[in-house]
Image: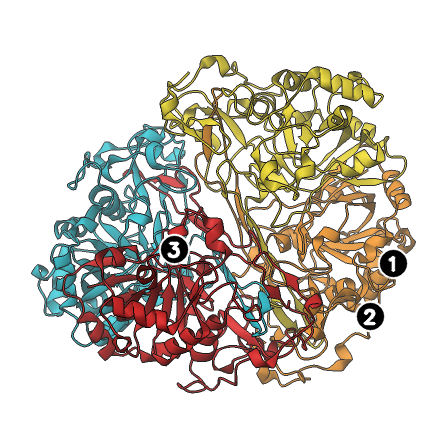
Chain colours: A yellow, B orange, C red, D cyan
Amino acid sequence: MCDISSRLMTGLGVAICFLGAQADCADDAYLPDKWWPSEWGQDDQRGALNRLTPAKVLEAVALIRKGAVYDMTRIYEEDMPLFDLTPGTRKFTMTVPGGPSWGPLGENRLTWSEDFISGHLSQDGTQIDSLAHMATVLGDPGNLNEIRYYNGLTHAEIGGGRGFSKLGTEHISPIVTRGILIDVAGYKGRMLERSEEISVADLRAALNEQGMSEEAIRPGDALFYHTGWGSLWKVDNAKFNSGTPGLSIEAGDWVVGKLVVLVGTDNWAVEAIPHPDPNWFAPNHQKFLVENGIYIMENLDFGALIEAGVYEFAFVFGALPLKGATGSPGRPFALN
Amino acid sequence: MCDISSRLMTGLGVAICFLGAQADCADDAYLPDKWWPSEWGQDDQRGALNRLTPAKVLEAVALIRKGAVYDMTRIYEEDMPLFDLTPGTRKFTMTVPGGPSWGPLGENRLTWSEDFISGHLSQDGTQIDSLAHMATVLGDPGNLNEIRYYNGLTHAEIGGGRGFSKLGTEHISPIVTRGILIDVAGYKGRMLERSEEISVADLRAALNEQGMSEEAIRPGDALFYHTGWGSLWKVDNAKFNSGTPGLSIEAGDWVVGKLVVLVGTDNWAVEAIPHPDPNWFAPNHQKFLVENGIYIMENLDFGALIEAGVYEFAFVFGALPLKGATGSPGRPFALN
Amino acid sequence: MCDISSRLMTGLGVAICFLGAQADCADDAYLPDKWWPSEWGQDDQRGALNRLTPAKVLEAVALIRKGAVYDMTRIYEEDMPLFDLTPGTRKFTMTVPGGPSWGPLGENRLTWSEDFISGHLSQDGTQIDSLAHMATVLGDPGNLNEIRYYNGLTHAEIGGGRGFSKLGTEHISPIVTRGILIDVAGYKGRMLERSEEISVADLRAALNEQGMSEEAIRPGDALFYHTGWGSLWKVDNAKFNSGTPGLSIEAGDWVVGKLVVLVGTDNWAVEAIPHPDPNWFAPNHQKFLVENGIYIMENLDFGALIEAGVYEFAFVFGALPLKGATGSPGRPFALN
Amino acid sequence: MCDISSRLMTGLGVAICFLGAQADCADDAYLPDKWWPSEWGQDDQRGALNRLTPAKVLEAVALIRKGAVYDMTRIYEEDMPLFDLTPGTRKFTMTVPGGPSWGPLGENRLTWSEDFISGHLSQDGTQIDSLAHMATVLGDPGNLNEIRYYNGLTHAEIGGGRGFSKLGTEHISPIVTRGILIDVAGYKGRMLERSEEISVADLRAALNEQGMSEEAIRPGDALFYHTGWGSLWKVDNAKFNSGTPGLSIEAGDWVVGKLVVLVGTDNWAVEAIPHPDPNWFAPNHQKFLVENGIYIMENLDFGALIEAGVYEFAFVFGALPLKGATGSPGRPFALN
């Protein structure tokens, strides 16, 4: 392990080896084995989206019998929590210029307004991470050839100030698939705590409580789990931003084994942050996005589904095809 | 008609009575009759979305037999056309700070990037207009009490620099409904021209060419029409921005009579711009949004649907719930 | 006084009559008498800048004997305090896209970066208010004809979503004038408190402590006063943003009588906020900008001047000529 | 020279070796000799600003005899030319949210607006480059350790998505120094052409025409030259952006030898772009910023100085202290 003096303790109490730190600041035991080429070929940019087929669409659609719609999206607004490793670095601004902006035009006297939006929109609020969001630094962090993404692509190859040339959000095709929600908070009877880990046993027990077994999760499914942490949204933003409960490393492996297309939750990570072992930072993010091409959705609202007791549904999501982006906001919803 | 000297001729050749122009600069013959309260009550903010019911969802879902997905969305990128009445006033910027932004963190050496997006995102590219987008100026444009939106709401009541307090995009619930595409350009065998109007007869003939009649359009449907103007996208942005072909006023009335939930097309208006009668500016925008609560979608890509010859389909769209916004980008798509 | 029930109590404990509130929500005793046309004519847009003449420049330059420069500017950075009436509504973001953005170009292998900045830049950090920043609502706040700026200009006449057509920052010509700093905190021997008012007697006593009399203030001078509140900058941003000490209404009148070109201080107001009389909100802002065309500078750093004991100096400031803007950041400094 | 096939021809006709190109894509004959440590020590971040002393301030101030002010700044507005290597990548947006944004507050019924600004503000319009703006890629462009700035600092050491940790604009202290303007266009009797080089002989002849010799340029001076290219500003933005006339490489060396603090001109480069020898890209930018710590100012307006025939003056400029930024807008002006 590297000398702690080359690190900075952040507000999260997380030890950070910053870009430019010594290359020897790493313990190879924590680094993944070589993860490329991907199972979908060395040129693949879509990852687990390859699991979505017309048959999978029809499997999802067959679940729609009532015509009910369950919104899973938080409202984007200026006072929503904006997670940031250092305080205040994430932004979301929406303004409406003028009163109104233009006109009136024509004898019909039409006038209109158009919003101006600014911020880290693709990473704030309810969102999906593209495969360009994260990478593993295999050597010197100053050498972009040693920063590796999904399918082994390097930052030197695909990075850029105007967007990634590969793996960007435009590669996330519209998603219609079967969705499974595991209500872990419901099973526990309480909101999970910051840094609390969810084990495989927890997931199985929560499924059982819902009258389901783990066999209910099929390849290509969108898998969601509820921690209750989302109840802090706009109620206690500081606590919401301070960390997360989430899947243990073993639970993350279990999810990978289920061959899902994406994992989604009601907070901003898919693991416990800060991690109980401080040598880890967001290992499931790394495992899902970088090593397995499984997408991550964050800050989802499961309220409508849980209130209705719906744990199996058709899941619909269309990411904005933002060229070269690391993620996208959107409007995920469920039907049954 | 008002004295032309109080106007400004824009790049579009459109006569504009700017905010602050004299109140007598109006010919009442062009103004609509009082359009409120709406048919859904004086407190309604959802307009034609009220036509979407569980039964309508099931009607749409019943059309999904193959599990095929047809994307209807343009990629959001910096060199897409950005319509603006005066050159250069619309913006879209996406940057990726750093190389990458953060880390590496942990012994697992995770690093990541997060985009920064800035611009008139809710009105650029493929998008939907909320009912807050447009209004009619019934008197002095400097008096916000005389600027009226859907359901008669005034700008003084609902306007604001941080978003509209009513009618904003957060009121656009997820949409799953039956979609009908009328391929007018296919029927005409050519791209329609700038300022060219589409008549009711054109719509009927194009439907007929598709083996459909106008009875195929049912209440709550999403109605799309293809002008071919979208073929200019990123091919000739200046021409794309210079104007549009679109529905005549009578065709707009016909659409209203069909009780649709939304109207969408492959350009940035739902009428001819500049209008053949220069006293009109965007009368169908006004009719749909302001008077009838019917939503408008712009800059759609019908390429996949037309190539497959699909004119009737399940239509899916989730607007970003941007609080108080005048519209939203999104990822509309079709299934059959 | 209007019915309190039509108001909203903000975080500052300030009663707000929002746009759209009843026109009768006003007590005329608090409204100024008609303040236009200005003493520089009904077409004037420059206000007190008219007091700056070549002779005044030479008067200032004559004070430069050592060639010493005293910076008066705070660093613009993401964790500076951003005052906002409702939490989180002001933003400042600076990112550097890419690593670096471009290149290398040529055989000389040049590469470069260019920042992206976003936010309420003209009103955050060290800044000057233009005469377009503030106005008085003489009647119905929904009627833009009754919102009056400097020289009686109405919002209907000059407002606009793309900038003000008059009074914008481009009218603030470069400033070289005599500067006077009154160290009120030095005289009091402590930082002034939130809502604490500075009287005319205080100003006179502080000047006396500096070996100066009030006659030292001459027409066209830039007048600065030090409250000590700036010591909270980046030390306790929440307290810094919570309110201000500042000039009493009488002291504001006294300043107007001195015929200065601008008033500057080390916090974000030129009066006590919240005001001891809750019926007032920022009366000196109103008096200076709207009624008298005197400019306001905020969030100045007097540290270098006070450390050197310099209270009379040549003051230099160049506002960014941002077309139609309500203010500007900048780099004010002093010389002697 | 590297294989042209690994390059991209841009709109400027400039051959670009993009980040990620092979390291052998370089001809060492075009690379500078090792340029660090700087003459002001290996820890210096201020470069030629070290030449500004109290004595130099007094030398400048002694030139102020009339009290006349000459503005040298272009107005920042949305339709100003925004140079960009690929079209549309630079942005500048200023909007005024609401009508107005807030209030009225208090019985004094105060209301106000605050602008929202977004864009590459530190590199657009009249601006100064900080020493963090440019670097030379000595080896593999994907290895940030081989990208070298002023004083040999590497991108791995000082780069970052939230600003540079060294060399940022906050290190540009307020500038008061002697200014010299060489009116090359005046001497030639015409606007210089795109790609036209200015020789040392041209500079000497133009100085002679002004009744000055090259000895008039003294250490610490701010040196400006007028090409006439600025007459295209807002008249023919496309041509203005298409390239520049500017100093030859030899003229750049001559300027370095004069020990100036900064070089400024009326276009967006300090050399001919595209360069007559296509193997060069912006060699004077590289020489001034990277190798010699001499600052660059761009898009200046010399109109007022030339009209008055003023070629020697006190020059005043205060960069915004934007933490970590690559440059700054500002309000340069001259006095005599």
Q: Which residue is mark 1?
A: B258
Callout 1 environment at 10 Å: few (<14), some (14 to 19), or many (20+)? some
Helix, strand, or loop for circle 1?
A: loop
Q: Chain of mark 1?
A: B
Image vertical order of residue C42 relative to residue D128, above or below: below
Q: In the visual, does C310 lie left or right of B122?
A: left
Helix, strand, or loop for circle 2?
A: loop
Looking at the rendering, in which quadrant would you find the C terminus of chain B? top right
User: Are labels 3 and 1 assigned to the same chain?
Assistant: no
Q: In the visual, does D287 lie left or right of B295?
A: left
User: Are labels 1 and 2 assigned to the same chain?
Assistant: yes
Callout 2 environment at 10 Å: few (<14), some (14 to 19), or many (20+)? some
Q: Chain of mark 2?
A: B
Q: Which residue is mark 3?
A: C230
C-alpha gap between disc 1 and disc 2: 18 Å
Is there any visible trace of residue C332 in the rendered image?
yes
